[in-house]
């Protein structure tokens, strides 16, 4: 198992990062929050999980070991593959997922593209006793930042493309993603005025807008 990669960030796309390790560029599939922490040309360490299929080897990247552990545990639930597990972590940080599953909060789980009510019920049934309790007090699931201070932050420049690319990567159509980005622009302006933009918070706000639509 490749538990982590460390090296200079060579390239970033809305869904992947290329990190140079020993002269080799390794492509890592990342969620929007993880990508928001990376900077081109800077060194980074990314926790990783290798998913092996008959026709592919895909390395998924995460901000920390806890996020990776939850990603791997989510896939033990029926019907949850790596893409859906990554989408769940894009919408909810690990502790919010723990809180949602423990509280049987189906509404929060169905905010994730690809999870309906029956799927949310199945996830709760199969993971309720396995995800564990939140590691730290959290606010309402799906609202506020709820993340680790200092994570998922970047300057105001580029937040629109980051959020738009993340939504498209989760399966939303381009036009829907554009509407959601416009809907959270006021929140982004407030964050900019405060000094930094939190991509994870904007993503969750955009997803709530799409779920209401």
Image (cartoon, rainbow, N blue to C red):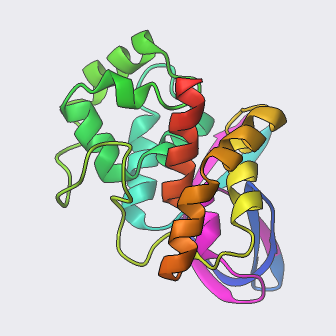
Q: Against 77, is 30 above or below?
A: below
Residue at 45% x, 56% y is: 68
Give how far across and how far down residue 89 sits, in percent: 48, 47
Residue 27, picture quadrant: bottom right
Q: Is residue 1 visible?
A: no
Which quarter of the image is occupied by the C terminus?
top right
Residue at 77% x, 82% y is: 40
Q: Is residue 47 magenta?
A: yes
The span shown in magenta is 25-54
Give how far across and how far down residue 191 sits, in percent: 51, 70
Q: Against 64, is 129 above or below?
A: above
Q: Against 98, is 79 above or below?
A: above
Q: Which residue is nearer to you in this view: 104 or 207? A: 207
Q: Against 28, is 92 above or below?
A: above
In the image, is 129 to the left or to the right of 94? left
Residue at 80% x, 61% y is: 13
């Amino acid at each position: 198992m490749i538990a982590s990669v460390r090296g200079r960030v060579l390239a970033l796309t809305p869904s992947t990062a290329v990190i140079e390790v020993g002269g080799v560029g390794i492509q890592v599939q990342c969620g929007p929050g993880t990508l928001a922490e990376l900077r081109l040309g800077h060194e980074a360490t990314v926790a990783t999980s290798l998913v092996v299929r008959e026709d592919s080897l895909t390395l998924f990247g995460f901000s920390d070991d806890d996020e990776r552990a939850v990603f791997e545990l989510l896939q033990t639930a029926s019907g949850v593959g790596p893409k859906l597990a990554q989408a769940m972590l894009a919408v909810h940080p690990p502790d919010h997922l723990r809180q949602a599953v423990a509280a049987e909060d189906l509404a929060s789980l169905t905010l994730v593209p690809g999870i309906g009510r029956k799927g949310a019920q199945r996830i709760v049934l199969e993971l309720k006793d396995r995800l564990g309790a939140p590691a730290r007090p959290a606010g309402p699931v799906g609202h506020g930042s709820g993340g680790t201070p200092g994570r998922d932050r970047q300057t105001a420049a580029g937040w629109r493309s980051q959020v738009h690319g993340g939504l498209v990567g989760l399966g939303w159509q381009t036009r829907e993603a554009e509407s959601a980005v416009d809907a959270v622009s006021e929140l982004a302006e407030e964050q900019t005025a405060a000094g930094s933009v939190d991509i994870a918070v904007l993503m969750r706000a955009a997803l709530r807008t799409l779920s209401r639509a």
